[in-house]
Amino acid sequence: MSDPIETAILEKLAKLPAGKSIEPAEVAKDLQPEQWQRMLPKVRACALGLMRQGKLTITKKGKPVDPTAFKGVIRLRLPTEAETAAALAALPPKPESDED
């Protein structure tokens, strides 16, 4: 089953022109308009997971940030092909199965 936060982020980004970004608060407000501040840490955590998978780029002042050391105001956008390739290359290799 798909994560509703992940779905909301990706659907919102899919509606934008290429290269445009959103604030995590926009997604939190869409999901829980009355208590969006409580939802914001979950949106940011989900965005971090998507960035590590190469599905999302987190930016600060228009430039991609290090996923292990960012804080403060960030924006989310779909990654370029080069950013996706770099994110996938950084993932640990999958163990090979021994099928003898």
Image: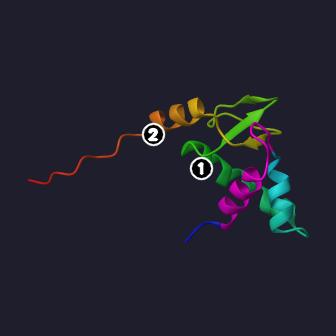
Give the vertical position of 35 relative to 98 (above or below).
Answer: below
Q: Which residue is mark 2?
A: 91
Q: Is residue 14 magenta?
A: yes
Dot 1, crowdedness within 10 Å: few (<14), some or many (≥20)?
some
Residue 10 relative to residue 22: left or right: left
Which percent across, then down, holds residue 27?
A: 80, 58
Residue 55 relative to residue 24: left or right: left
Q: Main secondary structure of the magenta part?
A: helix
Residue 96 relative to residue 23: left or right: left
Which percent across, then down, holds residue 47?
A: 67, 49
As drawn, the residue found furthest toward the left would be 100
Give the vertical position of 85 relative to 100 (above or below).
Answer: above
Question: Looking at the image, how many numbered discs can be counted on the residues?
Answer: 2
> At 79% from the left edge and 29% from the top edge, which residue is drawn?
62
Q: Dot 2 lies on which element?
A: loop
Question: Looking at numbered disc 2 in the image, what kind of residue is underneath it?
Answer: Leu
Question: Looking at numbered disc 1 in the image, what kind of residue is underneath it?
Answer: Gly
* Colour mode of the rendering: rainbow
Which percent across, then down, holds residue 90?
A: 47, 34
Q: Dot 1 lies on which element?
A: helix
Q: Classify residue 84 by image quadrant.
A: top right
Depth check, front residue: 73 or 76: 76
Q: Classify residue 81 by image quadrant.
A: top right
Q: Is residue 67 magenta?
A: no
- The tag on residue 71 is none
The N terminus sits in image quarter: bottom right
Query: First in sequence: mark 2 or mark 1?
Result: 1
The residues colored magenta run 4-21
> At 74% from the left edge and 39% from the top edge, which residue is drawn?
18
Q: Which residue is mark 1?
A: 49
Which percent across, then down, holds residue 2?
A: 58, 67
> At 91% from the left edge and 70% from the top edge, which residue is drawn?
34
